[in-house]
Image (tube, rainbow, N blue to C red):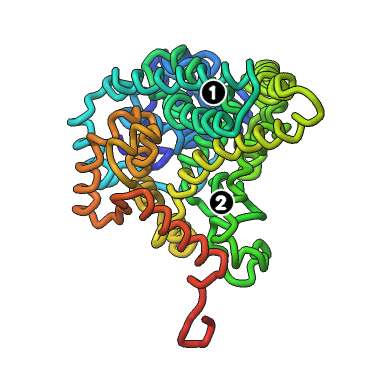
């Protein structure tokens, strides 16, 4: 069954475990049928206008799915489960329905069907998780982190150690926690949960990261729903707003010159973020994601405890070992250098992914202009870029393959070099624009040019009218 079929058709084909039709069961047993998304329980989710109870369902991916409680997860569900059909939803208990809304995205297009069919010939079902090579890479970076953290917390710090430890933390973010928090490191949920705490090992928070990052993946470059698109505002503009837009400031004209210093504060913004204690990620809330469910509330104590441990080990202890009043300034400098090294390694690479020349920064514009939903798979390709190859993948955790990663976010990064040629071939066949840069510096140069264009608004100017 096509995932973009009408919700009424979907409901007519779903059957509860007792054999009753979903719609009949809902309409007969639920006299006060829920009609507004904001009214659903924190243990329920909405998929194609049908409300499902998560609490009664044992998910093979573990309790992490409760993170999404209280939300419409239609896009997230189809994104995470590329193999699934309506039969898989029959395993879940239906508790109601909401009023159908018009979707921005469609699924089961010709392009999607072919790209999944061909990629699944390369990576067979059930084999999409971390390989021996992935785990060798992950444990190497974990070992490097442990060794450098030991020196960082047990002896006087140095500038070289600060830089090395900062980069080591970034490598954990790229190569360990990222696959794990995508559920892609292992088919065993406890392995993903454990490695996912790599986000907390580097000053972040796995639960806030997942709330933000999964939303970003579902709605990449969406003008209203992608938290990554607005997280750097008001300092940087990644969205190419029209001239005269209130978010445009005079200093954005020069953002191509100062974006790296801004990005160097990424680590500090994570460590000092009070949302770690509430698990209410502001960027996700701003785009409409509810995070008031019981699962997140129960994780607050763990997020807070881990954060205090991180701060004590990696910020407080260097002050103790450097000692003396004269060591305070040196320690502050080293801690900030460590944070900047991590920030620039992580954030500069992330900035390349969806901000480059000719990127589609508003993929759902046809929906607003013409009322025509767009192919979700096509939008993921045209809002992302890929650079380099296998070596870049080993250093960046496969995040140089952003196109492949956004098409198959629950596939381990170890597989992206193998599927990339086929993805490019199919994109060319269907006329889907695929951005590839042989070298990272080429992608970086394109990003700088894009930031300049966005900051100045030059894309909106007409040289024939004297705008330039």
Q: Of 167 and 137, which appears nearest the observer?
A: 167
Asked which quadrant contains residue 113, the reply is: top left
CB of mark 2 within 8 Å of CB of mark 1?
no
Label 2 residue SS: helix
Quadrant where the N terminus lies? top left
**Residue at image location 63% in from the left, 25% down from the top:** 42
Q: Whole-Å distance between the Cαs marked 2 and 1?
A: 49 Å
Label 1 residue SS: strand
Which residue is situated farthest in the right direction here?
A: 325
Circle 1 residues within 10 Å: few <14, some 14–19, many ≥20: many
Check the image and report above or below for 27 versus 243.
Answer: above
Q: Position of residue 280 (x, y in %)?
A: 68, 32
Left or right: where does residue 5 sit relative to residue 328? left
Reading the chain from its start, which is encountered first: label 2 or label 1? 1
Camera-side mark, 2 or 1: 2
Circle 2 residues within 10 Å: few <14, some 14–19, many ≥20: some
Q: Mark 2 points at which residue?
A: 260
Is residue 248 visible in this depiction of the protein? yes
Q: Name the residue under label 1.
A: 95
Q: Where is residue 294 in the image (x, y as percent from the top left)?
A: 65, 20
Left or right: where does residue 345 sit relative to residue 264? left
**Residue at image location 66% in from the left, 65% down from the top:** 251
Is residue 297 visible in this depiction of the protein? no
Q: Position of residue 120 (x, y in %)?
A: 22, 31
Q: Of 402 and 91, which appears nearest the observer?
A: 402
Q: Where is residue 332 in the image (x, y as percent from the top left)?
A: 71, 34
């Amino acid at each position: 069954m096509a995932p973009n079929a009408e919700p009424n058709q979907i409901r007519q084909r779903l059957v509860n475990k007792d054999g009753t039709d979903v719609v009949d069961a809902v309409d007969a047993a639920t006299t006060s049928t829920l009609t507004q998304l904001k009214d659903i329980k924190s243990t329920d989710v909405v998929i194609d206008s049908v409300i499902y109870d998560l609490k009664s369902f044992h998910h093979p991916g573990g309790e992490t799915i409760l993170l999404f409680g209280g939300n419409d997860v239609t896009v997230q569900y189809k994104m995470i489960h590329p193999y699934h059909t309506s039969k898989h939803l029959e395993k879940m208990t239906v508790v109601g329905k909401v009023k159908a809304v018009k979707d921005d995205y469609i699924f089961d297009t010709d392009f999607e069907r072919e790209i999944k069919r061909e990629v699944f010939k390369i990576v067979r079902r059930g084999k999409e998780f971390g390989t021996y090579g992935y785990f060798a890479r992950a444990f190497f970076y974990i070992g490097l982190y442990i060794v450098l953290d030991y020196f960082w917390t047990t002896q006087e710090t140095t500038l070289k150690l600060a830089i090395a430890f900062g980069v080591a933390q970034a490598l954990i973010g790229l190569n360990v926690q990222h696959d794990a928090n995508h559920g892609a490191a292992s088919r065993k949920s406890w392995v993903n949960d454990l490695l996912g705490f790599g986000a907390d090992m580097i000053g972040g928070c796995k639960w806030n990261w997942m709330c933000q990052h999964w939303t970003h993946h579902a709605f990449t470059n969406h003008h209203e729903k992608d938290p990554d698109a607005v997280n750097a505002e008001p300092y940087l503009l990644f969205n190419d707003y029209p001239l005269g837009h209130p978010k445009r400031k005079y200093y954005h004209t020069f953002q191509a010159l100062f974006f790296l210093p801004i990005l160097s504060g990424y680590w500090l913004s994570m460590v000092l973020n009070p949302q770690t204690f509430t698990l209410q990620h502001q960027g996700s809330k701003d785009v409409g994601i509810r995070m008031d469910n019981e699962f997140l509330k129960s994780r607050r104590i763990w997020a807070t405890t881990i954060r205090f441990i991180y701060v004590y080990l990696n910020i407080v202890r260097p002050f103790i070992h450097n000692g003396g009043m004269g060591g305070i300034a040196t320690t502050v400098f080293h801690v900030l250098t460590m944070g900047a090294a991590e920030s620039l390694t992580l954030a500069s690479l992330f900035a390349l992914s969806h901000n480059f020349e000719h990127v589609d920064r508003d993929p759902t514009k046809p929906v607003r202009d013409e009322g025509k939903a767009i192919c979700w798979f096509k939008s993921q390709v045209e809002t992302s870029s890929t650079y380099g190859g296998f070596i870049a993948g080993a250093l960046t955790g496969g995040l140089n393959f952003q196109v492949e990663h956004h098409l198959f976010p629950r596939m381990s990064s170890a597989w992206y070099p193998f599927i990339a040629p086929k993805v490019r071939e199919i994109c060319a066949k269907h006329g889907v624009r695929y951005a590839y840069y042989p070298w990272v510096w080429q992608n970086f140069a394109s990003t700088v040019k894009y930031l300049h264009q966005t900051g100045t608004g030059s894309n909106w100017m007409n040289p024939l009218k004297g705008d330039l």
